[in-house]
Image: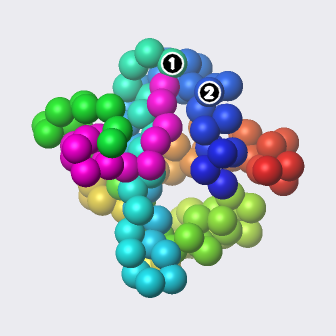
Amino acid sequence: MYNWLSEVVEDKGEQMVGKLGKVYMFGIVDKNDKEFPITLDFEDGKGNFYIGDPREPEKWNVPEKGEKLKIACKITMSEKDFHGLLDQTLDIRKAIFSRRLKVSGGIGGIKEANRLVNEFLKPYMIDTWAEA
């Protein structure tokens, strides 16, 4: 999963910077209820993907973006549900309403999450996720 996301960002990141222009974060929760942040940075340049929170670079060994970095939204879900999202067996709206997926940022955050899924993840999942 991580390699796949990294490859998609490398391939489409610059295009997504132009389309989205924001920083998105996933909080993936494992079986032991430990959360791992995954950051998709489409704020500038060619885009970037890393495991960690850019607001805590010393903790995660990630590029420093500053403590005041604005995250467009944070999507928190189990690893199983994240795979379901990528496999397209889990619809983002149904996941939000069933509380299997939590989105920070209020209504704006939900809109940004939907935009990220529809403009970044879905167009590239069908062709590449199955191969990963």
Q: Secondary structure at mark 1?
A: loop
Instruction: Residue at 72% x, 39% y: name it.
Output: 123
Comes first in the chain, label 1 or label 2: 2
Is residue 101 something one can see in this rendering? no
Percent position of residue 107, x then y: 32, 55
Percent position of residue 106, x then y: 27, 58
Q: Is residue 13 magenta?
A: no
The quarter of the image holding the N terminus is bottom right
Which of these two is toward me, 33 or 22?
33
Category of crowding for the residue at label 2, using alpha-carbon neighbours closer than 10 angstroms: few (below 14), some (14–19), many (at least 20): some
Left or right relative to 32: residue 55: left
Percent position of residue 16, x then y: 54, 26
Left or right relative to 65: residue 40: right
Residue type, label 1:
Lys
Instruction: Residue at 42% x, 33% y: name it.
Output: 41
Left or right relative to 127: residue 76: left
Task: Report the residue marked by disc 2.
Answer: 10
Q: Secondary structure at mark 2?
A: helix
Which of these two is toward me, 114 or 32?
32
Chain part drawn in magenta: 47-60
Looking at this view, name the residue that lies furthest to the bottom: 32
Residue type, label 2:
Glu
Is residue 33 something one can see in this rendering? yes
Q: Does the residue at mark 1 contact the one at mark 2 (Cβ under 8 Å)? A: yes
Up/down of 11 relative to 85, above or below: above
Q: How far is disc 1 from disc 2 in space, using C-alphas?
A: 8 Å
Instruction: Residue at 67% x, 35% y: name it.
Output: 7
Instruction: Residue at 30% x, 59% y: name it.
Output: 104
Task: Report the residue marked by disc 1.
Answer: 46
